[in-house]
Each structure stands twice: as C-alpha cells, then as structure tokens.
Image (tube, rainbow, N blue to C red):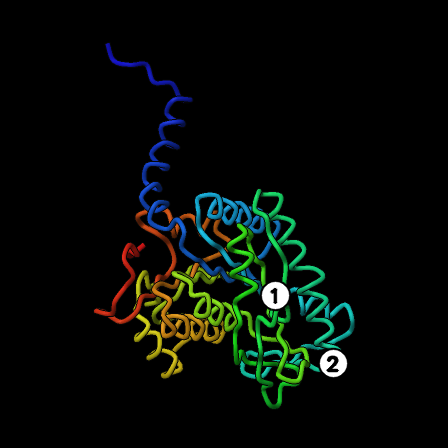
Amino acid sequence: MDPVVTDRMRQAQTKARVLREALPWITRWAGRTLVVKYGGNAMSDGADAAFAADIALLRAVGLRVVVVHGGGPQISALGSRLGLTPTFVDGRRVTDDATLETVSMALLGQVSPRLVGMLQSAGAPAVGLSGTDGALLTVAPVPGLGHVGDVERVDPQVLLTLLDDGMVPVVASLGRDAAGALHNVNADAVAAALAVALPADKIIYLTNVPGLYEDFGTADSTLLSEVTAGRLRALLDAGELHAGMVPKVAGVVAALDGGVQQAHLLDGRVEHAVLLEIFTDEGIGTMVVPERGSSSPQGVAAR
C-alpha cells in the first residue's frame, strides 16, 4: 500500500528538500567571513526584518558577518526636514558642517540603531559602530566636497575582536582623517576596504535593482548572472554603467583586486536575497569573480 501523504507532510517535505540543498553550502561557508553592504535604497520595514533574519541565520550556521550600511535616502529625508538642500558632485554628497551633522544624526541616530535592534530581535548579537571607533577607518579629505573622505587606511582589529566574540558588527560609514576631523565616507567604498582588510571571502552589495545589466535602459537589456572583474573594469573605464551602479561596481573591483574571491550585486528588496545567493544552487543577482585562471582558496565554489 502506498503511503498516505497529507498536505502538511508535503509542506514538511518541501522544507526538508530546501535544507538538503542548503547543507553543502552551509558546510562550505561555515567559518568564512562575509561583508554585506546594505544600501539605504533597499531598506524598508519588511525588507529590514527579512534581512535581519538572514544575517542571524548566517551567524547561527557559522559565518562571520560584518554589515556595512548606507543611508542616502534617510540622510536626504532628515536634511529636508531641517531645511537643507542636498548637492551632489559625480554622485557624491557635498558635506558642509550642517550636512555632516545631518549625516551623523541619520546614520548613528536612526539607521544603525534600527538595524542593530532588528538583528538582536532576530537572534544575532549585533554591535553598532562607525569607522571612527577603534581607529577603524583613516580617511583622506576629498578636495571640493567639504567633509568627505576617501578610505586611506583600515585597522580591522576592532572588527576581528567582535567577530571572534561571536558578534555581528554593524558599521556606519564615517571616518576621521589624520588630524582627527570627522568625514562622510561612501559606504560602498567602506565595504570594499573592510572586505580587503579583514580579509573576507565574499562581499555582497544589496541595493534596489536585481543586479548588473548589459545594455541597461535599452530593449536589449539583460541581467548578467556572472561576470569577471576585468569585464567590470572595462565597463567602468568606458563609462557604460548607470550612475547609481558606479560606486558599487568600483567597490566590487577594488575588493576583488584586493584578494576577495567573490562579489555579488543583489536586490535587497527580495525576501531572503542573501540566503538565496549563498545557500542555493542557482543563486540570484550578479556574481562577480576574479579573472579566469586566478587562484581561489580551497572550498570556495561558484555559488
């Protein structure tokens, strides 16, 4: 007699198949380091809760996760309430004294506490910090942009200590220059610099698009599932990328040039996007790998 399979049993079997598919990937990535840049454009009530649950699960199965967060829309919204008009040069926010105060308020007073709270509620012991803590980031001022800095040096010791203690560091993109002055720093660049310094095995950029497109904005536009760092470098040099993707792609290239073995551009609005990328055979979004033939650490697979 054939076994009786109820709807409840079928649902349980579906969950078991998911776990079976995920197990090899969980085993492969346990103990490895992952940097996730969570962009302000991807943030929302529903997305934040799913993101926090994903990070908590990654930590629970043995990954060492560092979260770097943006906050561009939140900074602009707070600035608008304070009567400030944002100014951008080549996609970078001009940061005068009032804007720097707004950036600090939005990142350290709104975005970071919210993410830390949601991570803790999801079961991940999270700690909020910025690039000013523990001399994490030393920056070089960018001429003409006010209090804006480029990452000059990273001291990852504070992150390594937190990771060794089982914590999830949540890093806001602020840093100090050699004279101790506070600067606003691009979060995409911060994520790449931290990934290189740790060093991380993988970096993920979560944004509000499905990934990187070829022929973006045309009828022939197609999502690139996998691309090499060399191809991205060529696209950057040729000016063929949508302006909003330039800092992320530049961060990806910098991370892979610095020794990180994999990078991903994912739609952070998709529920459980991080888990789908790391723990399923198909993955989603765009995966970026080093040049063909370059060496990879043992155990690091395509997805």
Residue sitting at x 55%, y 50%: 47
| Viewer can see residue 72 | no
Q: Which residue is mark 1?
A: 172
Closer-to-camera residue (136/256) = 136
Amino acid under disc 1: Ala
Q: Residues within 10 Å of mark 1 (few under 14, many from 20)?
A: many
Residue 55 location (% of width, % of height): 51, 49
Q: Which residue extends farthest bottom?
A: 143
Q: Position of residue 78 (x, y in %)?
A: 72, 67
Query: Which one is in front, 139 or 134?
Result: 134
Q: Residue furthest top?
A: 1
Image coordinates for residue 286, horizontal then vertical, percent? 36, 61
Q: Is residue 81 above or below residue 21?
A: below
Q: Residue at x 25, y 13 (%)?
A: 2
- Quarter of the image that includes the C terminus: bottom left
Q: SS at mark 2?
A: helix
First in sequence, mark 2 or 1: give its number: 2
Q: Position of residue 236 (x, y in %)?
A: 39, 79
Badge nearest the viewer, 2 or 1: 1
Indicate the secondary structure of the residue bearing disc 1. Answer: strand
152 sits to left or right of 34: right
**Which image quadrant is residue 200 in?**
bottom left
In the picture, the quarter occupied by the N terminus is: top left
With 232 as the anchor, is 192 left or right in this view?
Answer: right
Q: Reply above or below: 120 against 260.
A: above
Q: Residue furthest left?
A: 293
Real-space Cα separation, disc 2 to disc 1, in angstroms? 18 Å
Amino acid type assigned to the residue bearing label 2 in the image:
Asp
Residue 239 visible, this orientation? yes
Residue on which the image places disc 2 = 97
Q: Nearer the viewer, residue 148 or 216?
A: 148
